[in-house]
Amino acid sequence: MGQVVNQVQHEFWRPPMPEAAANQEFLEACRRCGTEFIVSSRFCHACGASRPEQNAHSRVMDLPGLAELSVLGERFGLTTASLIAFLLGIVCVLGALTVGVIFSAKTVLDWQAIQIWRIEWLLGAIAAFAAGGLLKKSS
């Protein structure tokens, strides 16, 4: 048992392993001192330099902007305005579906109110889809 303790390395960090050096996509080292970063650390534990940001490994959820909407619109063959109208129509359809889940009808009057809300959501969806169709580029 004493032989095992003598073989333990007493340093906190070690240079990258030769097997890991072959696979560079998982290995990331500090630009200032060359020390390998600890998993999910934002700073180098040896020199304190900040870790460079990588968009592929970023955990922050970014909301799509106009650039992403225009790319999505090009994929569907829609202009940005017609894509926004299409997405608004989808939200209205989802709103019509969730009205029945959120509200429960105990009387006939409640049931009628729920149906009117569904009709309003569906009319909004029809208006949004019609606006999207009118704003669609004709090619």
Image (spheres, helix red, strand yellow):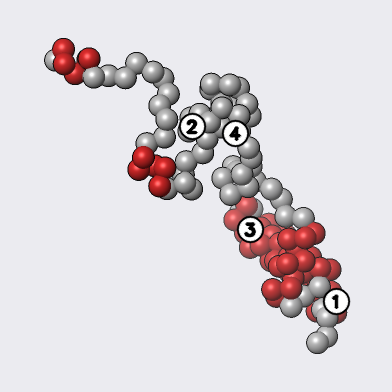
How far is mark 4 from mark 1, CA to CA? Answer: 50 Å
Disc 2 residue type (three-letter): Glu
The amino acid on which the numbered mark 3 sits, given as a three-letter code, is Thr
Mark 2 or 3 closer to N-term? 2
Query: Of circles 2 and 3, which is in front?
Result: 2
Q: Secondary structure at mark 1?
A: helix
Determine whether, in the image, residue 21 is placed left or right of residue 90.
Answer: left
- For marks 4 and 3, the one nearer the N-term is 4
Residue 117 in the image: state x and y as whole percent.
74, 61
- Provide the residue designation for mark 1: 135
The mark found on residue 36 in the picture is: 2
Residue depicted at x 59% and y 42%: 59
- Please tell me whether mark 4 or mark 1 is closer to you in this view: 4
At numbered mark 2, what does the secondary structure look like: helix, strand or loop? Answer: loop
Residue 81: x and y in percent read 84, 68
Crowdedness of circle 1 by 10 Å Cα count: few (<14), some, many (20+)?
A: some
First in sequence: mark 4 vs mark 2: 4
2 and 3 marks in contact (CB < 8 Å) = no
| Location of mark 4 (residue) | 31
Give the tally of numbered discs.
Answer: 4
Image quarter hosting the N terminus: top left
Seen in the picture, residue 70 relative to 49 is either above or below; the reply is below
Q: What separation in Å lies between label 4 and label 2 (alpha carbons)?
A: 10 Å
In the image, 33 versus 42, the foreground residue is 33
Precedes in sequence: disc 2 or disc 1: 2
**Residue 120 place in picture, x, y as percent:** 77, 65
